[in-house]
Image (cartoon, coloured by chain):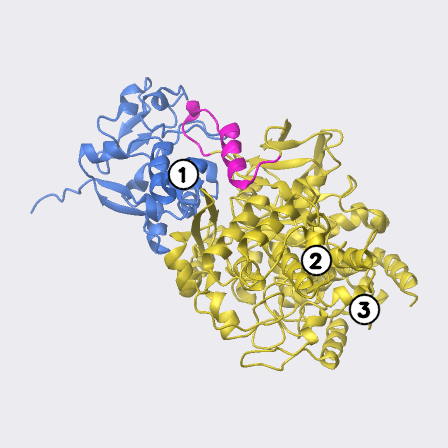
Amino acid sequence: MGFIVLAQIWILRDFEKCTGCRLCEIVCSLEHEGRIWPDASRIKIFEYSPGTIVPHLCTQCPGYPCVDACPTDALSVDSDTGAVLVDEGKCVLCRLCIDACPAKVPRIVKGRNSVLICDLCGGEPACVKICEEVGYYALRQVRKPNDATRKAYTVPPYEVASKLARRVYGEKWEEVV
Amino acid sequence: MPYGYWGRLLDIDLSSGSYRDYSVSSFVYRMFIGGRGLATWILWRELGSKWEEVDPLGPENILVILTGPLTGYYPGIKLAISGKSPQSNGVVGSTLSSEVAVQLKSMGYDGILVRGRAESPVYLYIEDGVVEVRDASRLWGLRGVELLKKLREETKKSSRSGESPWPPALYIGPAGENRVRSAAVMANYAHAAGYGGYGAVMGSKNLKAIVVKGSGPLPDIYDVDGFRALRSRVIDSILKRTSMRYWGTPGGFYSVGYVTSSEPIRNWQEEWHDRREFSVEEAETRLWRKRFWADWGCPLACMKLSVVVRDDRLYITDGPDYEMGAYLGPNLGIFDVEDAAKLSALADELGLCGIQVGNTVGFAVELFEKGIVTRSDIGYELSWGDTSSLHRLIEDIAYRRGFGGILAEGTYRAALAIAKLKGISEDEVLRYAVQSKGIGIGAHGIRSKKDYPQPIAYAASVQGGDHTSVAGLPADSSDSETWSVFLDSAVLCMFLASDEDTMIEFLNTITGWKMGREELYKEVGPRILSLQRIMLLLGGPDVYWDPRIHDDNPPRFYEPLPTGPYKGMKASREEVEKMKKEYFAGMGWDEYGIPTEDTLKKLKIGDAIKATKKIKSRLGL
């Protein structure tokens, strides 16, 4: 007899497979807001061009700089999943978490009074589910990888796009991205 | 409180730079659904009484951009573009995939009306209902790829509030700026509302682009639980369309020629080919840099990313899709997929409808072949399969250079102009024009009878040669134009549509309506089609249609197929006349396809009766 210790999860993204369909944004907003509200999605798709499409969301990066930076204790780490949780009552939209985030993931949108950060849907991310359901597999649920891997994914979308563009379009990639 | 739509549009006047709300009642939505249907109602209401005098390229025309009640909820995305068409002089509901549709609904509006004309080039930046008319002098002249990059830089927000994507845009290329009648309204590199020529309408308003950003949610859904269940069921059924996922429409490159004998080849002189080098397998191995590219909310991903490196630069397009590939491939005597993809990308970046310009260029090459136009007219030789001269001609059309200026008027008007120029009869030139009512016919022929369009598909359509809006029997079935009207009015993608019952159930789940099959086929469909038909027959000011002459197939379709397994087959005049009669009767129209007084009263559009009287008196009926 003993306790079952659940491994923390992570959303692995495969940029080359992302079709840009935004089904992740649709189900994210349905899950969190109960309606289709693309701007309030915790995952956002950056489609620089059809060949360079970047799903962008929290990576639960090492040290959680956003949580450290929060002056009102509105941000905390969910010990079960490893996700950053936002206490809507405490968030004052001061933007310090955004400044602290290497990938500028937390978002402030009209109509919401606290920052939006992926909460991993409490362990069963809806975005991953739909992406697998329709057979695109750009998002997969995996065990939380090591610090170095998570850090490598913690970059602004343009950085990812420019690397993808070199591969997809070759030396003339700057004509596009 | 309506469900699925907001009941208001943003009404923008470029002449004064002002804008206001334009309300649309729930009663009108139920009568016209949205999208193409609602556009028809708006155009009738705003311009109907002076329709014949409205110059499609004048400031009095209204560019109509509308979503529908299924937009954003049903998988995938479409947006309907309309106005008085500079091709048919009627109303065309032209659709394209664009995230702009979702942004519109997210900002609390179902669509936009654009009136007037700006004094100098502008673009519209619209955020949450606030319209900014911005100077576009830096953007004027830019082609698609360059423009999108510039617009992204101009409209990207600082990351102060976190990284958010830049808003999507509708735009025109040089062809629209130069009011080329085959210019499309474009989005996202390779997406075009081609039929109708609304890129020229945008250009005539000095409007380079429309950028839309909405921050809010979509309108409420009547039955949210029902919606979730139905949506899952629909997605499951869409996922069974595995060949569309794998190959997309380029799957037709070879088969529409070889199997069904209905692909345009050398301006429709033939419709059959056995050229294996023009096949999806070649596209897959030589062109595709990415297999699955999807529009907003689409579980199918029929698009492919094709890249061709030529002339020391990149040419970027979709598959190309079947229509573009066929029209800028075999129809021009080109059977190399890379050449066809390059010309498709060229059409995209110039903002030309690939179908219309492919139709016109094919027509020009045949006139050259027949000696009706010569090197002294064009300035260079034209021949089938000569990609470099065909490339040059497409550019000449987009910039209205030399003979390109005549061809920029579209196949029908060019034919009339060439007849005049050469001093020969119109019929001698029109026999090579494969169009119906000013609109070049889509890349699915009728002669072999093995493809989906029926013999009256184009002859009786209110959108002329539009292969996505074909007439057919029975009049009250999904084989008739009523079904296209439904898809374009609820506004969704035809490749994602389910069966009729599911579609109607979906519409009712979102809106809370209790629409039945009967209401769709006996009221809504005929109502929209009747109004479209009336405005098509009103026409003007430069072109008028006579049902006795123009409700017909192009002469080419009465010539026998010269090759292939269906060699010798051709359209039959007797059959076309018989089917047309039956179709018109099914719609409640008279023998000339003019809606009767009874029909218009029954459809609750009795105010259109006076217009039918005008049409009859012009025709001497």
On screen, residue B13 above or below B536: above
Question: Which residue is rendered at x = 63% and y = 76% of the image?
Answer: B447
Q: Is mark 1 on a helix, strand or loop?
A: helix
Q: Which of B602 and B245 is in front in this view?
A: B245
On screen, residue B558 above or below A35: below
Q: Colour of chain B?
A: yellow
Chain holding disc 1: A
Q: Give the range drawn in magenta.
A: B141-165
Please give the residue where the numbered disc 2 appears in the rendered image. B374
Please give the residue where the numbered disc 1 appears in the rendered image. A172
Left or right: B488 in relation to A104 = right
Chain holding disc 3: B
Say which amino acid is labelled 2. Thr
**Nearest to viewer (mark 1 / mark 3):** 1
Left or right: B617 in relation to B526 = right
Q: Where is residue B539 in the image (x, y as percent from the top left)?
A: 81, 55
* Residue B130 within the segment the image draws in magenta: no
